Amino acid sequence: MTKPKLDDVCQVRCFNTDLVAQVCDELPGDEILEDAHVLLSALADKSRLKIVYALGDGRELCVCDVASMLGVKVAVASHHLRKLRDLKILKYRNDGKLAYYSLKDQRVSDILNSVLKQIAR
């Protein structure tokens, strides 16, 4: 562990009581923060980011489509899709021998697009 520099830490112990109280009052509840943590953790993988992006605008892809898009084996694509489904980000439906995936909530795509726009600035 690196030792902090003196210029990047407070040199005396104090805090703004009113500001800290205001921030604490404004913090979302633990359940909301946990849901945000789950979503952001799920998107902390480049392949899963690509999947969420690809499923934006109401698109639906089968596992083979996702594997082709990612350039990976079907088993790898299926693993990512299952993880996103288990986290309640994706939903799926079977059509004969094919499994199709889509976003459960379009707002996830909106969040990703907002982040990408910020980064592209």
Image (cartoon, rainbow, N blue to C red):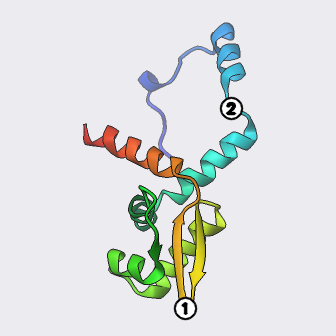
At 50% from the left and 24% from the top, the residue drawn is 9
Question: Label 1: which residue?
Answer: 97
Identify the element where label 1 is drawn.
loop
**Disc 2 vs disc 1: which is toward the camera?**
1
Where does the C terminus fall, quadrant-wise?
top left
Q: Percent x, y for residue 109?
A: 46, 51
| Figure quadrant of residue 86 | bottom right
Q: Nearer the viewer, residue 102 or 82?
A: 102
- In this figure, which residue is indicated by the disc labeled 2? 28
Tell me the residue at 42%/57% (across/down): 56
Q: Residues within 10 Å of mark 2 (few under 14, many from 20)?
A: few
Coordinates of residue 116 in the picture (x, y in percent) = 34, 46
Report the disc number at residue 86.
none
- The amino acid at mark 2 is Pro
Give the residue displayed 48% in from the left and 57% down from the top.
Answer: 44
In the rendered image, residue 87, in percent from the top left (x then y), is placed at: 64, 62
